[in-house]
Image (cartoon, rainbow, N blue to C red):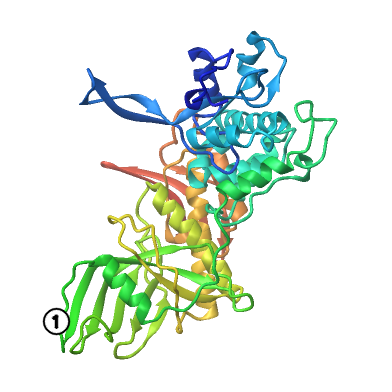
Amino acid sequence: MAEEHNQSTEKCRADFKIGVRRALAAAAGNRCSMPRCLQETAMAVTAKKKGVLTAEKRPGGIGVAAHIYGASKTNCPRPSELDDAALSNFSNGIWCCTNCGRLIDEHEEAFTADALIAYKYVRETANSVASKSPIISKLLPSITHLEYEEIVWKYYPDIEKNTPKIEADVRNSESIKKFHKPFYFPSILTTPTPSAPFVKAGLTAATEILTVQLVHPPKLKPKPGDQKTIECIAKNWYPRWDLKPNIRNKVSLGEFYGAITAICPKTGELADERVKVYGHGVVAIDTGDNIESGNRYGFACWLRGRDELPISWTLNYNLKGDVSEIKQQGQRLTSLYWTDSIVENLKQYESLMKKLIGGWAPVGLLGCWTDFKGDSFHDDYFPIHKMPSESGLREMHHRARRTNLIIEMSSIYQLPLKISDAVFCTDLSDEAIEQACLDLKNVSANGVPSRYRSEPCATGDGWDIRLVFETGFNRFALYFKKTILT
């Protein structure tokens, strides 16, 4: 029973004490333990003083402690004959958000005690493994919690014994968003397993309830954009825009955004990747005598990726030219600091390039107005007819993969690695990069040595590439450097 939502007049005879509730929240990492939710439950809320809101903040959130086994002869779910001490013990509680707390209570038959024990074990163990493993703790911000939990479920019930495999899976994860894909539940959850002491029966019913309640509905088959799409975008950005009759009305979208993705030519499936690009656009609306109907909409946009993304997209729909293309642009990589949004976009970019090399067709999505967040796009896509050559696409994929590798090495070994031109050299292998970073870390207990030069990571006719650390007046640089040998 979710304690904070029991509306019955007959209270549970074994409520959790405040210390137990706090311990449950901490063990779960202040996240809901339901595998398809994982909602963060801790946050700051506005404090009240004598019933009046103040400018101060206090700890709060949406977390509740739910009973796994409840007390018999009450309205607690999953009744049992356990005594009060056992019912109010930490082992009989599972931490979840308020919505899932209600879900557990309303579907008592589906969410059996065995299912909740399994969910509690996986969430708490996943949180423990992430906090103990330096690799997972550094990489976890780069992937979603749903993706991490999916990896952990693969090694249920012996999760802690498989920590090295979990670390490897986290490192090799290609996608950071899998919200629209089926959640992975191993067969062990649907058949009794003697080796798992906390699992007594199948969990199929609970899994089905979670799927119905918490999984996104199947995506509709995408369709090409048309004038209706442009009209929707125009009204989304300017809902109160006044049109004048018998004239071409134009409006400039000075900070417009969109996304480049891909579509499978065989199945019509739209890829999950969304590579965000930014720039400006123009909406043109040709009106007649009646501005309420019969208007002709056109749209043009010129969008490009940030400095980290060597990609741009030009769209011209229903205007002169009717051109749509993506092309490779220059790439400048000077920053030593990478925000979560940049890392996410780079991973999306690498995965998208892999699909385009594999034969998927590039398409573009137009952005919807969401207070400059740039995270919502219209469902309709616009085909992109012109694109870089196959060799150009392979180069773009290679640069994206190398960029992500350097960011990963910087995160794992806590090194201020700068991305240089030499790191994109095809003679420099991924293994050599990883080994050079590991060697430097091993000799950097007291900081990176000044004027450091690694052993050659790649060699050629009259040149080599090494990992070097150079210092100067008010500057330092750690990067892979190609040196011409004399």
Q: Residue at x 27, y 72 (%)?
A: 234
Q: Nearer the viewer, residue 255 or 168?
A: 255
The reply, left or right, for residue 129 in relation to residue 225 is: right
Q: Is residue 10 above or below residue 209?
A: above
Q: Residue at x 38, y 26 (%)?
A: 60
Badge count: 1
Q: Nearer the viewer, residue 228 or 303?
A: 228
Residue at the front extreme?
9
- Residue for badge 1: 244
The reply, left or right, for residue 256 in relation to residue 197 is: left
* Image coords of residue 240 (percent x, y): 19, 67
Q: Quadrant of residue 299?
A: bottom left
Q: Is residue 433 above or below residue 11?
A: below
* Image coords of residue 261 (percent x, y): 48, 69
The reply, left or right, for residue 269 in relation to residue 316 is: right
Residue at the right extreme?
194
Q: Residue at x 47, y 24 (%)?
A: 4
Q: Nearer the viewer, residue 319 or 470?
A: 319
Q: Residue at x 68, y 18 (%)?
A: 72
Q: Quadrant of residue 36?
A: top right
